[in-house]
Amino acid sequence: MRDVYVIGVGMTQFGKHMDRNMKSLAAEAVNSALNHAGISKEAIQMATVGNAYQGLVTGQESIRGQVVLRAMGIGDIPVTNVENACASSSSAFQVAWMDIALGLHDVGLVLGMEKMYMEDREKRLKLFSSSSDIEIIEMFVKAMKEDAEKKRKEAEAKGVSEKPKKKVGGSAFMEIYAMGTRIHMEKYGLTQRQLAIVSSKNHSNSVHNPHAQYRQPYTVEEVLASPEIAYPLTRPMCSPVGDGAAAVIICSKEYLKKIGAAKPVKVLSTVIGGGMDRGMDDPDLGERLAKVAYEKAGVGPEDIDVAELHDASAYGEIYNSESLGFCPKGEGGIFAEQGHSALGGKLPINPSGGLESKGHPVGATGAAQIAELVWQLRGEATGRQVENARTALAENGGGNIGVEEAAMVITILQSDF
């Protein structure tokens, strides 16, 4: 297996781009990545394209990647389309990495793209249900909503939570996240305020990210006072719906030397795993996959300088920080409360603003995480730069079956200059 390097990244601003189509968003991200790498589109030898929902949103199936790339003049190369829920473009990255590592090609393009926002809110929310077992999700969500209302009333009676000023609906996934949060609260003592600390931290980070969907800071009190999506999650604790694209250029060491690329970032490992039926106290997918990722990379959690974690809700960051070994099991909330995951802390997490604030156009999310980490490792994350960042980790979950994600990709990167 050959060493593989990232030499360029780019992305659009995430947001509600009602006046733009997928071809426009993809072209912006790809051209930005090519410029960052210092190469032309003619240099690209292969491409993998991650996308989850365009078949449902626009009816475009089967050749989504070929359609957008041909529109910008990239053709006559192998294009592989990858659909893997929220982990679509991180899975596409792993496929492209294998291609380059095996010596099939020397330089490749990874593109993640999604257009999710539409005026029809009910149709929009149904997109997320398609990333679970559709035969049971409606029944499951109904039971979770009933449990949420019961637990919220119990918390009010104990004086540890106030009745929300307003309740607004969310997707099936927010109900799933809320259920996991309540279990964690009961088992380990996680508090709603600790969730708000994570959310406030991520919204503050996104103020300095020009690619973020939301760039408004929130105090902890403002997060707690916001409308409730599903107890104990308030709106700023949850990722928004939006559109966007992100692109990554990777190459072999031989190609790197040939073009003399500046500030290359080495892929130490990129691994993909799937969920399983397990007991609640058994190791989760993140724990199982992290062991593989660390072993292949030759590093441990103590070596990670900066991380982008899949925080579709604030609980996602807390839970994954534990699973990846950044703190002991059950102490993710304490880890955040003590400031360890903030900029300037022991291990800054989601300096981009995370999915909660940067945004979560599903097919683009994994590639966007890698883009942020490459900027961090190259010292190019102005305003949110993690000092002396050399080794970085991205964790991107996708879909849900049972008690854990249906898919997950963990990628570990390191500056090589």
Image (cartoon, grey):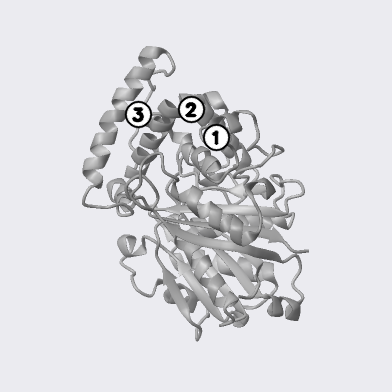
Identity of the amino acid at label 2? Leu
> Earlier along the polypeptide chain: callout 3 or callout 2?
3
Which residue is disc 2 drawn over?
190
> Earlier along the polypeptide chain: callout 1 or callout 3?
3
Kindly state the secondary structure of the residue where label 3 is placed.
Answer: loop
Q: Callout 3: few (<14), some (14-19), or many (20+) C-alpha neighbours within 10 Å?
A: some
Check contact, mark 3 vs mark 2: CB within 8 A: no
Any part of residue 336 in sight? yes
> Which residue is rendered at x = 60% and y = 42% of the image?
326
Which residue is disc 3 drawn over?
167
Q: Please identify, in this view, whether the residue under mark 3 or under mark 2 is nearer the observer.
A: 2
Identity of the amino acid at label 1? Gly
Check contact, mark 2 vs mark 1: CB within 8 A: yes
> Which residue is rendered at x = 56% and y = 62% of the image?
270
Identity of the amino acid at label 3? Lys
Foreground pick, 277 / 175: 277
Question: In the drawing, what numbered circle is on residue 332?
Answer: 1
